[in-house]
Structures are given as structure tokens and as C-alpha cells.
Amino acid sequence: MNPKMRLRSLKLFVRTEFGVAERKLDFREGLNIIRADNTSGKSTALQAIVYALGLEGMLSPSRRIPLAHAMTASIEIDGELRSVVESYVALEIENARGDIITIMRSVVDRVRDRNLVTVAYGPELTVAPKNRREDYFVRLSGGAQNVLGFHRYLADFLELKLPRVTRMDGSEGPLYLETLFPYFYVEQKHGWAGVQARIPTYLGIRDVGKRSAEYILGLESLDRILQRQRVRSSLSELEADWQGAVSKLSEAARVSRVVLQNLPKRISHVTPQEGIVPRVVLNGEWKDLAQAITILRAELAQLEASPVPTAGSSAREVESNLQQTEHSLRQALAVSASIAEEREELERQNQQTQLRLEALQEDLQKHKDTQVLERLGSQHAHALLAEHVCPTCHQHLEDGADISTHAMTSAESIKFIEQQISTFKNVHDDHQRVIAAMLAREQSLATEIHDYRSEIRAARDTLKAPNSSPSVAAIAQRLRLEGRIEELDELKETLEVSRREVEHLRERWVKQRGFLKSLETDDLSQADRGRIERLQHSVRTQLASYRFQSLNPSEIEIDTTTYRPVHEGFDLGFDLSASDMIRLIWAYLFGLLEVGQETGGRHLGILVFDEPRQQDAARDSYAALLAYASRAGEEGAQVLFATSEPEDSLKEMLADNPAYLLLLAPGEKLLKHV
């Protein structure tokens, strides 16, 4: 299902000390036309739609309210200018699933800030207001990404899964709604100056016009860009895993006094054909690990082939030492098992501490957002206490527990949560230190256990030997050899496992690099080319019907790198008459609407034009536009025009094409005193 937005109703309200002025406009599917005289306020109605959606940032980076004086300062009541003491706009919209919300935003208010938006979950302008309400903030940092940001909510409501795109500084950020709506709305003052005249470049998104067009048209090229970003992220993760595996390999070698030859420093470095070679010093010479183990085994076999000198007088002492060593071994094994069990329990506790920290961070952000809403004058701040859940420990509360949702102010809650975060961070750090100490102790015990076992084997060998005085040097040498062989055998197994892991990670990295390279081509897919060709065909067909004269419409092309209309590779501008530039904008935006509504497209299926008959466009051209807009409406789009065209002339140009007319009588103002 493609995303969709439908305007259902718009209300503008102004209060003065001498009375109220307001207007409610209801809209329908298809072509809607607001007909009113110049300076009557029809542009204010369209600007109010943009303002209600918090999208005035698409017009300019200015924080100025884009509404007429009558909404912001003073309005004529009974022939006198009266100061505005309160004003707001309300907009009822519907999404593709038929869900309806009503958006309310203050313009002038002594309590509510204009960056506060109230959302009623239901139709409050066309049906009696009995809906749940919540407040969000807009035009502030976090408005597009935080939970309480209105544009995050609006994008979710409209089912727009906005991608993360590259900024001018190389970082990534969301494709803001302000970058999409210039394709849906053309305002009167500057919007008709050129194609994509109001794309907000100040947001710092690289190739913002191109990214927005790709998204609206549903081009696979945008998916390829996002895929590149995911592959780059995967490459970073693989490199981190590879670095960890190499560090583990290096540490194991270091502990066993082995040097790793040909060990690459980066995953991108090619390993020599012989691979990673572990080498060890033996009798003053460097030997491969396998060769060293073979030599040591041969030496041990040679010693074992000769009888070991024994001493009968030391037999009892050896036997006593054997018993004591076996007891020490059992003790060390018990202590090691106990420490391992304690460490695992502490690791589980530390994991719970980490989860608690994450929950506290989420609560902290939620309270900070609520504080923003309260500062803006919200009376519908989000309730942060879930029913039957303690806000401090997040545990379930039994029925009958006395809970107060106003025990602390937002500021007090924020301070309390910050203190909790500090405490839990200290606990987490302490856990990490204790776990590290336990691991070190376990390693030390492992060495002790290894030595005990070596001593037991040596003592048993001694007791088995002939009843003569043994050579202490011979026994010590055998023990050293056995210990070293066992150590190197274990290291060999560890190195083999780690080596395979390192090589496997690099193989995956190489494949991902190759995949990334294949994605870095700018060639359009066949499906993308088909969409662009259909857009080009639509633009050419419309231009012909609009009596476009500056160039042959069949020579107008859609550039496959910018997705803008061009002629002989150049953007269209000075080579067009002013009226033909208007015709080109009509054709381009309706073409985007047509192609963007195809399966896989992301156009919202709405177009809003303020005074589309600019530059005295010919009557037959305007009639052709009305006919095309009416057909677009019958095919599922919603089109809204605001025009000062005389009513009789407008109806004549419409002919039999269906349209819903919202007519203001000559001289009538949009805001009417009631």
C-alpha cells in the first residue's frame, strides 16, 4: 500500500477583544478549487495547511510565521482593526488506511507556544470532538526523530519510512518532510519561479533535490544508496570483529611467548600465501610452532627412553608431597568452579544493570521532551507512568497500590533519573572491574592447576622409577618439557581456531567490498529507467496540451542524474518564457504525481497550487490544466487550487470536468466575523 494524505477539513480561528472571526473549509476527493478575490485570504488558507503540518521550514529557514496579518497581529472587525489576542489553525487529515487525526497549532496564544502541536486521534472538525489528545513539539531539535517530535509522528502516521541520507559534512541524517512537500505544494510568491524552486538546501542534505525525487518516485537507485550505507556499516562491524579476533590471537601468542609472523595490521591488508605463521625460540633459534613441538617431543622421548635415577630414601616424602599436591589440586578446582559461578552470576547482574541503564536513558529523554512540551504551554503532556507500573523500578504494582502521577515535577524527575543513571553507571563500572579481577584469578588458578597436574604426573613417574637416587635436574627437565609441550599444543589449537576465524572474517569483508563496489555504479535499473521514461512522457504530453511554445515539447527530457526537466543537457530557465516556465512546473509536478502513485512510489497523492494561473497564462492552457487536474482526481489523487479567476470564467473553463468549488463571494474575506 502506497502512502497517502487526504485533506478533510481546515479551520482558521481568530479571537479579538471585540469578537471572533473564523472559517472552516471542508475538502473532498478529487479536484478542489477555492475561488476568492485577491487579498481575500485564499493564500492564507493554503499557508495554514503548511503551518498546521509544521512544514513552514520548506519555505525558508526563517522562524517567521507564514500567515497573514489577520492571523498574527490585527484583523478588521466591524470596520475597525482589532488586535489579535488568540488565533490557531486546525487541520483534519486522513492516511491510506483510513485513520483520521486532527492537528491543532496555535498562532497567537498567551500560554501555548507556536512550536507546540496538539493531535486529536479522530475527526474533530467534521465530527463532535470526543477524541484522545496528545501534544508534540515541532520546529525544534529532535522534532523529526524523537518520540515526542511531531514530524516523527506525522511520518509514521502517513507511513513514510524516511531513509537516512548523507549530509554535506559526510554524516547521516533523515530525509526531512520539508524536503518532500515542495513536490506537493507550490506557494504563490516564490514557488512559481522555477522547477524545485523551494527545495530547502539549508538543511544540509547532499543532493537534496535528487534524494527527494528518488524517494517520491520510488526509484531503486535510492534503495541502492541506502544499501550502500548498510554495506558500509556491515564492513565496519566486520573490521571491528576482525580486530577483536586478531587481538585475541595476539594475546594468546604473547602469553605463550610465541611470535606471529605475517599477521596483518588491517583487514584490508593481504595475508601472504603461507598465511599467519607462529614462531617460537628454541635453543636460541626461531622455529615454526609445529617444528618446535616435534623437536621438544623428540627430546622428551629421548629422556623417557633412559632410566630415571631414583632414591629410595625419598619415596615417603615424594608420596606425602603427592597427596598434598592432589589435595591442593582438588582445592584449586573447587575454588576455580566457585569463582566461575560467581562471575557468571555477576555477569547476569551486570546485564540487568545495563538494561536498567537503557530504560533510565529512555525515561530521561521522555521526561526532557515532556519538559519541552510543558514549557511550550502543553496541557496534554504524555503520561510517563504506565498503568500499574512503578516509574522508578518498572515493576508491576498490585491492584490497590496508591500511585500518584504528580509526585514530582518534570525537573525533579529529570534530576532524580540523572542521579539514578549516575548510581547505576557506578554499579556497572564496579561490576566490570570485579569481573575483570575474577577472570584474572581464574587464569591464575588455571596456571596453578596446570602446574599441580604436572607435579602429580612427575611424582607418580618418580614413584614408578627404580629405587635409586633420582637426578633432580633430570626430573625438572622432564617437567619443563612436558609443560612446554602441553602449553604449545593448547596454543596450536587456539591459534588454528582463531586463524580460521580471522580468515573467515576477511573473506566476508572481501565479498562485502566487492558487493559495495557493484553498488557504486550510478547506472539506473531497468525499472528506474521505465519510471523516468513515463515521467518524461507525461511531461511532454502535458506540455503539448498546455500549448507550450518556447521549445518543441518532444525535445524536453528528464535528466537521469538530477531527475529534472532539461533541454540538450541543460536545465530549463532563461530559454523559456515566464508563462512557459509555469506550464513546465504544472507538467513536472503532475508527472511526479502520476508516476509517484504507481506501485512502489511514495507520492502522497496530493497537489496544492496557489494561483496556478501565473504570468497571464493563456486561458486555453489553464483550461487544459483544470481538465488534467480533474482527471488526476478521478484517478485517486486530491488536488487543491486557490484562484482569483472569476466564477463564471472558472466554470466555463471547467466545462464538464468534475470539481468541488469552495466559492467566496466578490469582496468576501476568508476570515468572517461571527
Image: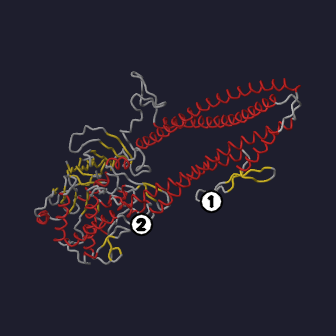
Task: Give the secondary structure at mark 2.
Answer: loop
- Give neighbour class at mark 2: few <14, some 14-19, many 20+ (Cα, 10 Å): few
Q: CA distance from mark 2 to mark 1?
A: 36 Å
Residue shown at the point (23%, 61%) measured from the top left: 39
Work out whether residue 12 or residue 261 is closer to the camera in this orientation and state it. 261
Checking the image for residue 503, the label placed there is none
Work out whether residue 392 or residue 107 is closer to the camera in this orientation and state it. 392
Examine the image and state in which quarter residue 424 appears. top right
What percent of the width, then of the height, locates residue 600? 31, 56
Three-letter code for the amino acid on which mark 2 is drawn: Asp
Task: Give the secondary structure at mark 1.
Answer: loop
Work out whether residue 302 or residue 485 is closer to the camera in this orientation and state it. 302
Name, please, the residue furthest toward the top: 400
Nearer to us: label 2 or label 1:
1
Evaluate whether residue 91 shows in this view: no
- Judging by the rendered image, the residue that carries numbered circle 1 is 273
- Judging by the rendered image, the residue that carries numbered circle 2 is 522
What percent of the width, then of the height, locates residue 47? 29, 57
Three-letter code for the amino acid on which mark 1 is drawn: Gln
Horizontally, is 458 left or right of 233 in the view?
right
Evaluate whether residue 375 shows in this view: yes
What percent of the width, then of the height, locates residue 374? 41, 41
- Give neighbour class at mark 1: few <14, some 14-19, many 20+ (Cα, 10 Å): few
Q: Is residue 421 above or below residue 529?
A: above
Q: Is residue 227 above or below residue 487?
A: below
Horizontally, is 419 left or right of 363 in the view?
right
